[in-house]
Image (tube, rainbow, N blue to C red):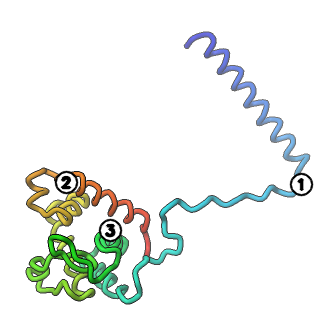
Amino acid sequence: MGPRLLILLAVACTACSGAVAAGAHSKAATAAVTPVPRIPALPARNTLSLGRCPIPGRFRSAFVRAARDTGFQLSMLVAVAEVESRFKPDARSQADARGLLQVLPSTGKSLNLSVDTPATNVLAGARYLKILLDRYSRTDLALAAYNAGPTAVDRAGGAPGPETFSYVANVQARWAALKGCS
């Protein structure tokens, strides 16, 4: 260490020890003074403060059932639905994915579930996501495959492009913001 740095360190230590000693002495003298009120910390941005998932009431039982059936956190399924359809049961993609979790009819058929009714659409999406998670063993890859398809993810060795990167990031951010919702 240079001599200037040592001098600066010594001055800082001396100042701190003096402040601590003065603070201990003045505490006894000011014990009768009213304590300063503390302002509570603001909640983190984009977090759910009530602990209740923002699921429209008419779809709540479908999401709870799908979470129970697959073992997924309710918050994860809600995050996927928010990013996929914004909870619009009649949503349809250019690829013909349908409903709250944007499930392809062929995927629903392979799972023996209709994608055209909200309850079975949510269950089909959750079960398909579970299949993908079992296959890839990583949430980010499962979400990428849910968005772009497993073939594209296999070919690319991960998210196949910026749209899928963005999708995965959006779902994961929303999922984190909803952590612990019920």
Q: Earlier in the sequence, mark 1 or mark 2?
A: 1
Q: Is residue 149 visible?
A: yes
- Which residue carries the number 1 mark? 33
Tell me which amino acid carries mark 1: Val
Label 1 with label 2: CB-CB less than 8 Å: no
Badge 1: residue crowd in 10 Å (few <14, some 14–19, many ≥20): few
Residue ID for mark 3: 83
Q: Which residue is mark 2?
A: 159
Report whether 179 appears left or right of 77.
right
The secondary structure type at the circle numbered 2 is loop
Which comes sooner in the sequence, label 2 or label 3? 3
Mark 1 lies on a secondary structure that is: loop
Decide which of tag 1 and tag 3 comes sooner along the chain: 1
**Residue 14 place in picture, x, y as percent:** 74, 25
Horizontal and vertical percent for residue 151? 8, 60
Residue 38, located in which quarter of the rendered image?
bottom right
Res 18 label: none
Q: Nearer the viewer, mark 2 or mark 3?
A: 3
Residue in the picture at 21% in, 60% down: 144
Q: Residue at x 40, y 62 (%)?
A: 176
Secondary structure of the residue carrying numbered label 3? helix
- Which residue is at a point 16% across and 53% down the rendered structure image? 160
User: Marks 2 and 3, how far apart in space?
Assistant: 17 Å
Left-right relation of 137 to 52: left
- Give the left or right position of residue 18, taking residue 75 as reference: right
